[in-house]
């Protein structure tokens, strides 16, 4: 009855199923781990946003790489803006602050305004003052309203220096004057001809909030720390697919068995053809 399981078709089908099941189980756990990472990251961001601000000099220094646990930590900085070395980061939408999202959501693509804030000790920290729309000529530096002059105290969210690996933004050379792809101290110093030492990481400006007006950068939105994404649903989906493999295999087995039984029953029901007795001679009909 079950000798058909040794056929080439069934051997291949069974092997494919045995390979797919552990692969889909592993994909389910991969999505589960992504879900857990997203939840933990949301908790970290929420805690950072609620924490009291600390001086930027206490958490970073020149060449410092901002660790993940300091992501979006609220910091303060006191100094004066250096607009002469201001640059803009290309391919940014009003709702994005660090990923190549130039084609998502139909949002207008523009620039993030990056202005060095020179501290009292002569070092500088990069401040992302917000988003501005592009001008008519993308090769020219856009018209940007200047920041407050004189000594100011700003509050911002600490972000690590951007890299292509972390953001997905492809770095490019030969850009127009004072334009960059990645918000990174090395790129800003090169593009803006900045000579001061730059602290590691940069600030997303929270306050003071700039007044609306022509060329005034719009604030960078607060990071989303509520959404958990679809990863848990994907994990459950992969595990359901895993369970469907043996179920499907049994369904196909039962169907094949039913077809064999039906064929045998059909053959048993057919009348047997009469046989001539051995050695008989057919009689000719006149």
Image (cartoon, rainbow, N blue to C red):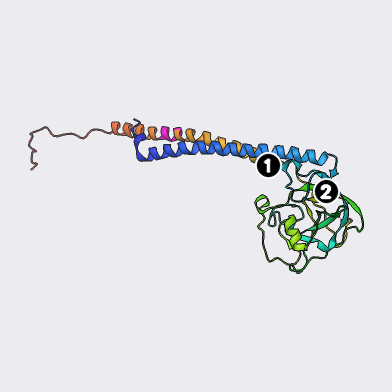
Q: Quadrant of residue 32?
A: top right
Query: In the rendered view, does 285 fall on the left or right side of 260?
Result: left
Q: Which residue is rendered at x = 63% and y = 37% of the image? A: 33
Tell me the tag on residue 156.
2
Q: Residues within 10 Å of mark 2 (few under 14, many from 20)?
A: many
Q: Residues within 10 Å of mark 1 (few under 14, many from 20)?
A: few
- Report the residue marked by disc 1: 229
User: Which image quadrant: the N terminus?
Assistant: top left
Farthest right residue?
150
Q: Earlier in the sequence, mark 2 or mark 1?
A: 2
What is the span of residues highlighted in magenta in the rendered image? Answer: 250-255
Instruction: Kindly tell me whether residue 122 is visible in this rendering.
Output: yes
Closer to us: mark 2 or mark 1?
Answer: 2
Viewer-side residue, 269 vs 162 = 162
Horizontal and vertical percent position of residue 236: 60, 36
Q: Main secondary structure of the magenta part?
A: helix
Q: Which residue is rendered at x = 81% and y = 61% of the image? A: 86
Tell me the tag on residue 127.
none
Query: In the rendered view, does 27 fall on the left or right side of 211?
Result: left
Residue 165 belongs to magenta span: no
Q: Which residue is rendered at x = 83% and y = 47% of the image? A: 57
Number of labels in the image equals 2
Kindly check if marks 2 and 1 are in contact, taking CB atoms under 8 A apart as contact. no
Question: In terms of secondary structure, where does tag 2 sit?
Answer: strand
Horizontal and vertical percent position of residue 183: 74, 55
As drawn, 251 above or below 64: above
Viewer-side residue, 279 vs 119 = 119
Viewer-side residue, 162 vs 220 = 162
Q: CA distance from mark 2 to mark 1?
A: 26 Å
Instruction: Kindly tell me whether residue 109 is visible in this rendering.
Output: no
């Amino acid at each position: 009855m079950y000798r058909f399981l040794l056929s080439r078709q069934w051997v291949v089908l069974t092997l494919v199923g045995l390979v797919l099941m552990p692969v889909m189980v592993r994909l389910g756990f991969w999505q589960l781990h992504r879900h857990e990472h997203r939840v933990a990251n949301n908790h970290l961001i929420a805690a950072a946003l609620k924490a009291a601000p600390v001086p930027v000099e206490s958490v970073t220094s020149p060449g410092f790489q901002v660790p993940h646990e300091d992501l979006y930590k609220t910091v303060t900085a006191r100094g004066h803006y250096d607009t002469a070395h201001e640059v803009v980061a290309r391919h940014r939408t009003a709702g994005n602050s660090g990923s190549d999202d130039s084609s998502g959501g139909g949002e207008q693509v523009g620039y993030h305004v990056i202005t060095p804030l020179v501290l009292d000790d002569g070092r500088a920290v990069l401040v992302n003052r917000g988003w501005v729309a592009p001008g008519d000529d993308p090769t020219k530096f856009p018209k940007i309203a200047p920041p407050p002059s004189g000594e100011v105290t700003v509050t911002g969210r600490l972000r690590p220096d951007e890299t292509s690996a972390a953001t997905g933004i492809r770095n490019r050379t030969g850009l127009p004057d004072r334009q960059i792809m990645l918000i990174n101290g090395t790129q800003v110093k090169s593009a803006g001809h900045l000579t001061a030492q730059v602290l590691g990481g940069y600030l997303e400006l929270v306050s003071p909030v700039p007044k609306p007006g022509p060329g005034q950068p719009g604030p960078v939105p607060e990071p989303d720390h509520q959404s958990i994404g679809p990863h848990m649903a994907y994990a459950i989906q992969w595990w359901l697919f895993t369970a469907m493999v043996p179920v499907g295999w049994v369904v196909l087995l039962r169907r094949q068995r039913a077809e064999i039984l039906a064929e045998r029953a059909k053959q048993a029901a057919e009348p047997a053809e009469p046989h001539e007795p051995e050695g008989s001679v057919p009689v000719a009909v006149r």
